[in-house]
Image (cartoon, rainbow, N blue to C red):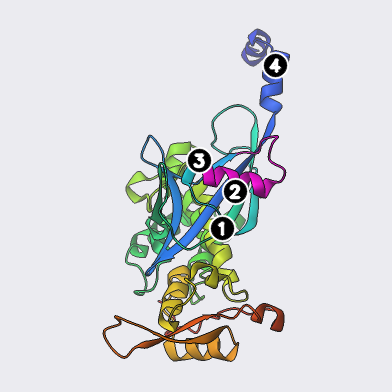
Amino acid sequence: MAGVTARAQRAPQSPQSRAAQDRVTVDLSAVVVAVAGETPRVLALRGPDGVDALPAGPLEPQHRTLELGLRAWVEAQTGQPLGYVEQLYTFGDRDRQLAGPGRVLSVGYLALLREAAPAGDSSWSDWYRHFPWEDRRGGRPELLDRIEPALAGWAAAAPAGPERQRREARLRLAFGLGGLPWGEERVLERYELMYEAGLAAEAHRDGTRPACPALAEGAPMAADHRRILATAIGRLRGKIKYRPVAFELMPPTFTLSQLQRTVEALAGLRLHAPNFRRLVDSQGLVEETGEVAGGTGGRPARLVRFRREVLQEQPEPGVKLPLSRRPG
């Protein structure tokens, strides 16, 4: 009866408020990636609370296409004109933590460019600052000694039966446990597990999951931007194996060592140098310039450039990942 009384006393929504709640808007978000030295970076806007956000803005009537709208927002907010751009995914969960009434669909994009000086309030942020467990170039990160037991405890807290088995299977697959290999592309799966277990700061902020702030790993991002960034990292890690997108991040001329370090930075893994060079040469991905790099401190390294003709010669020209050792 009390519930009936409460419903009877609740003020009916006005047509305007119902329309606001039902309104669907489209947001355009950009994961703009560059590599400096051995550091993969993402272009970020620093919010008033000190939390990074991706360049983003709403689709407006003057934007002829979604991509043109995205390019306009990124250039206005960061001063960066974009080159290579591809659509990632459309994020439209009802519980997305975004300001304002109504439902927001966010169309995420991945953009690759050679690093340049940002403008305004934007800056380049090391993406491993947000996902430190993803960098295995120095072996298995020590922080997994904290993360994996916490996730195991979360899985064990589920009632015995299908739900517990589902959690345990997701954990083994995402983090390469129980003899399974580490899958460098499973970035989003690992982040979502940590969010559900309360090990991501966003879970504490959103109030959608019980959180453990003491174990909140990685720098958080505004709204669900860390989820969008995780999607982009996983996509890029997969794509470098079968498409020459890594060359979008390289200068016009470079050494094979510089190319290898760029691929390693993206993949978060160390590669076997001789096998990497053989793969690059055998696929005809680069050509000699006849010049050498100076200031290497040793034998001068030959400079090469990307052979764009390879895009017509091979269906899937990529830079495969010949690991230097099995990741820990």
Judge depth for marks 1 and 2 and give the one in front.
2
Note whether residue 121 is visible.
Answer: yes
Give me the disc on residue 71.
Answer: 2
Q: Nearer the viewer, residue 218 or 52?
A: 52
Instruction: Tell me if 146 is positioned left or right of 188 in this view.
Output: left
State which mark lies toward you, 3 or 2.
Answer: 2
Check residue 62 for magenta coloring. Answer: yes
| Mark 4: amino acid | Gln
Amino acid type, callout 3: Ala
Q: CA gap, disc 1 to disc 2?
A: 10 Å
Question: To which residue does mark 3 refer?
Answer: 223
Closer to the camera: disc 1 or disc 4?
A: 1
User: What's the distance in space between the residues labelled 1 and 3, CA to CA?
Assistant: 20 Å
Q: Which mark is residue 16?
A: 4
Q: Badge 1 local density, few (<14 within 10 Å), some, or many (20+)?
A: many
Say what secondary structure mark 2 lies in.
helix
Identify the mark nearer the N-term, 1 or 3: 1
Q: Is residue 208 above or below residue 199?
A: above
* Disc 3/disc 2 C-alpha distance (Å): 21 Å
Which image quarter holds the C terminus? bottom left
State the SS at label 3: loop
Q: As shown in the figure, which amino acid type bears the numbered disc 2?
A: Arg
At which x and y percent is residue 280?
Answer: 54, 86
Which stretch is magenta? 58-76
Give the class, few, some or many, for how many residues have Cα within 10 Å of label 2's Cα (few <14, many ≥20).
Answer: many
Question: Which of the 4 image quarters holds residue 15?
Answer: top right
57 and 108: which is toward the camera: 57
Mark 1 — residue?
111
Is residue 99 rendered to the left or right of residue 21?
left
Q: CA distance from mark 2 to mark 4?
A: 33 Å
Residue 259: horizontal and vertical position, in percent? 46, 77
